[in-house]
Image (cartoon, helix red, strand yellow):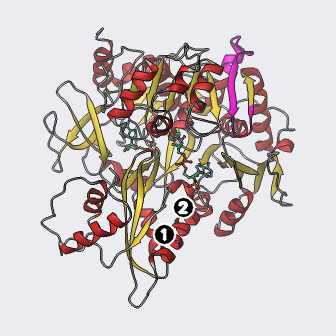
Amino acid sequence: MSGEYERAFRESVADPEHFWGAAAEKVHWYKKYERVLNSENSPFYRWFEGGVVNSCYNALDYHVENGVKDRIALIYDSPVTKTIKRYTYGELLDLVARCAGGLEQLGVGKGDRVVIYMPMIPEAVIAMLACARIGAIHSVVFGGFAARELAARVEDATPLVVITASCGIEVNRIIPYQPLLDAALDMCAHKPQACVVVQRPESPTILKKGRDVAWNVLLEADPVACVPVLATDPLYLLYTSGTTGKPKGVLRDNGGHLVALTWSMKNIYDIRSGEVYWAASDIGWVVGHSYIVYGPLFYGCTTILYEGKSVGTPDAGAFWRVIAEHGVSVLFCAPTAFRAIRKEDPNGEYIKKYDLSAFRTLFLAGERCDPDTLIWAQQHLEIPVIDHWWQTETGWAIGANCTGLELLPVKPGSCTKPVPGYDVHVLDAKGTALPSGETGNIVVRLPLPPGCFTTLWQNDKDFVKTYFSAYPGYYLTSDAGYIDADGYLWIMGRTDDIINVAGHRLSTGAMEEVLASHPDVAECAVAGVHDQVKGEVPLGFVVLKAGIVKEQDVIGPELILLVRQKIGPIASFKAAAVVKRLPKTRSGKILRGTIKKIADGVTYQVPATIDDPVILDEITVTLRGMGYPKR
Ligand code: COA
Ligand code: AMP
């Protein structure tokens, strides 16, 4: 071991200003910042105050002006439409500059919001960068969300413009977006000035007169230059699940984000400028923002935009085909993708069919990677497989094996060590530091490094209350886990009602709100239970109102449809059972954790505070009838 990681980590914690000031030398500033860090108004830290910058300039113009105009910036690889399209840095810049010009013509300027509700097509990336170019704040909404979720985001972000496409393609299913957008806007008091629509040949739509503008028409505008913005000005707003049905708008700045992501490309992922980096995620998630769009382009890499799944498009070799065909050096994806591949191809036969010689490292995140899956990937790929941990709020990894500093030994099940900049601690409920090996609340001592969220959109109050009030001076991650004797981090699960379904962050509270809205439901509970491929899936339990007699096979599908309509297919809500009562404590708290343990087949103790232990037997019988536990 070189000790490079320890040195960097210690320096980042002892003198963050010096550490991040050095990292900031690697990016382009129109005007250098006056201070690296302003800590005067904790927890509202301001990185690179006074600096003037543009994120789009750093992603595109900088490279074009420095002689790599013809390097491939973006490869759109879409097995679902059988398309592969490459864009050089020069071509991408031209499209982005025209799109930015078109947005300006629609009246969009610095600080205005633009909602991007799009599938995984190049126009989505172009739209994001175009917003960054003119200082507008983009808010990308994942395409698998239903109209109501889109409406909640439109209402909160109050965008001047919404950019969308005529349809998404889910393997072999066309998903028309226009009906979803129309339904969402009908629900909103806020009406955007215009909607820009990319017409996809697979299913074009009829544009609404007076509201819709065709993407091609938007791009007829003259290209415009970058608008210099303050480092502390917001770059984007991304909604994520909170503990209530209302999503939280995570706000990210320009300067800190630029410096942190640029640093991470070299030091975490050990990629070189010009190499091919692939994050097999979706632009609707934070991983897509950071590592499909911004990080690789800041660093002059070629990034891949993949419209497909890990299996079934066309087979379990889908990922290996992409890696071989485009010479991918680093792949970043969710463990669920690997569990799906492993299920289809347990002996790794598809892996052997492809030339994966360029492939150096696999990074996994989004949910805990079970050791079996990690070891399977290690054995079949014969490269380092790194689990790393992060959150929408941080925007980049909190815990990782920083392979560009030095490759530390991998411990399957652990996300290795805190990344430089994150001073991670484990505390008990009273705020006492726990000894190594003991599980508690994982917190990060302030300041958070650059790149982390600066606040919640128009909601400073909840920002402070949710993340900084439990332990003053620390950021509460809402993850539980421990640090072992070697300083390795083990992230074991959430402490709130968030579950991770196929790497997608969802709130069981939000699903309960939907179930409770069914006219026949008196009470309900949703628990995340183990799933072999998706990690976790939600299971619903409902108690019907007195006098309602409905068979399980009638109410079940109604509830499933309701969640699909109100939250979206991405919730993977596929089972709801009617029970006579829910297990509760004497004070009326529903024992969701106990339901989960029964469903997962984990040994559990009957909680001392339970109201009536017999209910647990009834729940056990119901779960058995549903096929649980599955392992
Ligand atoms: N628009 C509309 N619907 C969408 C959608 C989108 N953008 N994305 C997903 N959905 C739908 C799916 O079609 C599916 O619908 P169904 O229940 O009718 O079949 C549902 O939402 C659940 O999707 P998903 O969780 O992706 O499950 P899946 O069975 O389609 O695929 C995997 C499972 C593991 C193969 C797939 O999730 C995968 O390849 N994941 C890769 C990693 C990843 O995406 N990570 C994100 C976080 S880093
Ligand atoms: P998201 O904000 O969608 O990125 O989800 C963040 C949450 O996903 C975290 O709070 C964790 O609960 C979980 N998560 C992400 N990466 C990991 C990981 N490598 N190990 C364990 N949990 C993870």
Q: Badge 2: how crowded within 10 Å, few (<14), some, or many (20+)?
A: many
Residue 104 rendering spot, x and y as whole percentages: 77, 43
According to the picture, the residue beneath numbered tag 2 turns out to be: 567
| Quarter of the figure with residue 88 | top right
State whether residue 372 is above or below residue 329: below
Q: In this picture, which residue range is highlighted in magenta?
A: 62-83
At a point 32% along the width and 79% down the height, the residue shown is 580
Q: Residue furthest bottom?
A: 547
List the residue tagged with mark 1: 514
Return the x and y of residue 401 as percentages of the image width and height.
36, 23
* Identity of the residue drawn at 35% across and 57% down: 497
Residue type, mark 2 in image: Ile
Give how far apart the Cα atoms at labels 1 and 2 are.
8 Å
Tag 1–tag 2 contact (CB < 8 Å): yes
Label whose residue precedes the other's in the sequence (1 or 2): 1
Residue located at (45% from left, 69% from top): 513
Question: Whole-percent x and y of residue 219?
Answer: 83, 38
Q: Quadrant of residue 605?
A: bottom left
**Three-letter code, disc 1:** Val
